[in-house]
Amino acid sequence: MSKITVALTEIETTAARAMTTHGAAPWIAAEVARAVRMAEATGNLICGLYYLESYCTQLQSGRVNGAVEPFVSKPKPASVMVDAKLGFAQPAFARGLPVALETAREMGTASLAICHSHTCTSLGFFTEQIAQAGLIGIGFTNASAVVSPPGGNSAVLGTNPMALAVPAKDGGVAFQFDQSTSAVALGKITMAASAGEEIPLGWAVDADGNPTTDPNAALKGSLVSTGGYKGWGFGLMVEILAAAVTGSVNSMDVKGLKLADGPPHDLGQFYFLLDPTGYSGDGFYERLARVADAVAEQPDARLPGAGRVLPSEVQVDAMLWDRCVNLGA
């Protein structure tokens, strides 16, 4: 597989051009392209350029509305709701975030519900923005059903990720994580199948509910939750917050996220925003430092996402890059 070096600015520009060529409004394409750039910068390849062709084909088929203006409202004093109107999640979040930040600073906490949107791909892209603004950000979203319950063999939940980002005292992000509640992301199994490689035992079960190392059998079966019943519980929590609270679609009712045709995704995302000093003042940062120092004392340990420095360019699969460039031709 041939690789080439591409600047992140070029990745962002190319992604935006491809989406506007296929019908997205310029400001909407720009918001989605920022997320594509960040995914590539952090090595989250499944959420980066890998998704661009899907965005473009679904813009053409009408699975996602690339020109709709999200509608922001406040149904309760500390509740911010954004109706994405079956458009992209990134611009919906961009419209709702300033209102949610203002609300959280005034009230001490706020919730932000993104309703009826296209997939948001990388959830940490959003919670990081909350932490960059000085607040704790916790996020949840669901996806098409690929995870069966413990002891079962039929998918009920999506990979249903959750993310946390914590602000540093002097600005920036102290640490953050973004992880699925399934044992692994579905993309890793599809990539193993394409490469003809086996997968570790404990990632998935086949159509009969038996553990398997065959990625093709796993794709006909379902993933399992990380940590068994514990991960299943977290997945259920995410499903309730992302689907039920936002009034968006259940994982079981989402068709394949990358299929060119079909109904809109109609997914939801839910975020908590919290003023870290609202209860303990600077005591928050003292307790945070206590944990950070204890981790830093151990040579091979680190807080997730702490001190992250992003590159200015990355390695990209040459064939994938050519396809992305041609999408904007």
Image (cartoon, rainbow, N blue to C red):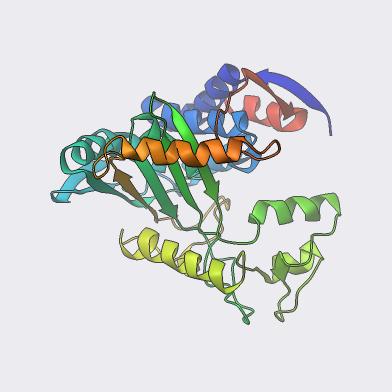
Picture coordinates of residue 43, whole percent (x, y): 65, 35
Say which residue appears at 42% left-offset and 65% top-offset: 237
Report the quarter where the C terminus lies.
top right
In this picture, residue 272 sits left or right of residue 197: left
Report the quarter where the N terminus lies.
top right
Res. 75 in view: yes
Picture coordinates of residue 163, whole percent (x, y): 47, 48
Res. 90 in view: no
In this picture, residue 236 sits left or right of residue 202: left
Picture coordinates of residue 287, whole percent (x, y): 41, 41
Examine the image and state in which quarter residue 70 appears: top left
Q: Please tell me which residue lies in front, 11 or 273.
A: 273
Q: In this view, does 293 lie above or below 198?
A: above
In this picture, residue 266 sits left or right of residue 14: left
Say which residue appears at 82% left-offset and 65% top-offset: 214
In this picture, residue 244 sits left or right of residue 57: left
Picture coordinates of residue 6, whole percent (x, y): 68, 19
Q: Is residue 13 above or below residue 184?
A: above
Say which residue appears at 53% left-offset and 20% top-offset: 13
Say which residue appears at 73% left-offset and 67% top-offset: 202
Q: Please tell me which residue lies in front, 150 or 319.
A: 150
Examine the image and state in which quarter residue 321 appears: top right
